[in-house]
Amino acid sequence: MATPDLTQRIDTLAQWMLESEYLVVFTGAGISTESGLPDFRGPDGVWTRRDKGLPPQRRDWSGAEPNSGHMAIVELQKIGRLAFLISQNIDNLHLQSGIRPDLLAELHGNMTKLRCERCESQVDRSSGLTTCDCGGKLVPSVVGFGQMLPQKDLTNSFVHSQQCDLFVVVGSSLVVTPAADMPRVALQSGARLVIINQGETPFDRVTHLRFWEGIGDVLPPAVDRLKKLME
């Protein structure tokens, strides 16, 4: 049951999405926790467990399915309200949910894809290919620590962040750069900033609207409310 305060904030988010002419969504590991995948800084997150001296939990990512948070973003795409989606996740759940590849930047790669070292085009790992059509070598697309982010996705992310008028963060602690620089770029361009995340972020003092509740309790009802406002 939503509290009056939560209902009011959801109504505000829906109204802002209605008014927005260029909505960019930014997702982190928190959006996938409801699909059974670990986040990084939550109570049982990867880094939280490491800091406590605990081993990472073993989970089979292959069986994970998109949840209501993923599907709410797909709904924004269907009704023509999503300009671009930037994700830090490698779990393939956004593409699996139905997000168009041309509207998505996966900054840290995708565990189901290979990327060409030369032209950055991608193919499915299941293809068995080792060489791109351009002659470049195909390598796992997931970005490791210290490795460069894919230049095309990074450039697109900054361009869309600069152009947006509403930037919605979903399930990210916003501490990993350069990805975490994008909300700053959006703010500097005059965009409204909304954060849906159960942990603290460095942007909490400057955000225009803050949700500490679970993503499934916020984003799906906000999109439902938006659709009613559009009728």
Image: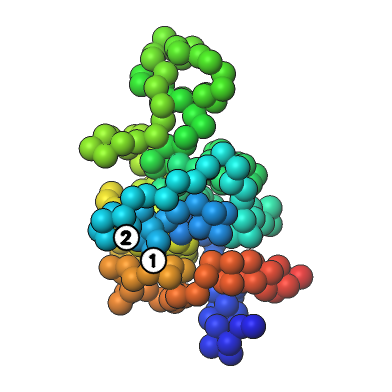
Q: Nearer the viewer, residue 50 or 142?
A: 50
At mark 2, the secondary structure is helix
Q: Inspect the image, locate mark 1, and give the three-letter code of the amino acid beneath it.
A: Pro
Vertical relation: 56 (above or below) 41: above
At a point 56% along the width and 22% down the height, the residue shown is 126
Mark found first going from the N terminus, 1 or 2: 1
In the shown orientation, is residue 213 left or right of residue 100? left
Numbered label tally: 2
**Could you tell me how far apart the alpha carbons at marks 1 and 2 are, in whole angstroms?**
7 Å
Above/below status of 186 relative to 114: below
Percent of width and height locating residue 134: 44, 12
Q: Which residue is mark 1?
A: 43
Residue 214, relative to residue 98: is it above or below? below
Q: Is residue 176 left or right of residue 223?
A: left
Secondary structure found at label 1: loop
Q: Residue at the top extreme? A: 135
Picture quarter with the C terminus = bottom right
Say what amino acid the circle numbered 2 marks: Thr
Side of 5 relative to 159 (left or right): right
Q: Are marks 1 and 2 in contact (CB under 8 Å)?
A: yes
Viewer-closest of 150 and 152: 150
Query: Which residue sits at x=47%, y=35%?
Result: 111
The reply to whether residue 196 is in sight is yes
Nearest to the observer: residue 147 or residue 155: 147
Residue 206 lies in quadrant: bottom left
Residue marked by disc 2: 48
Name the quadrant of the N terminus: bottom right
Identity of the residue furthest to the left in this view: 146
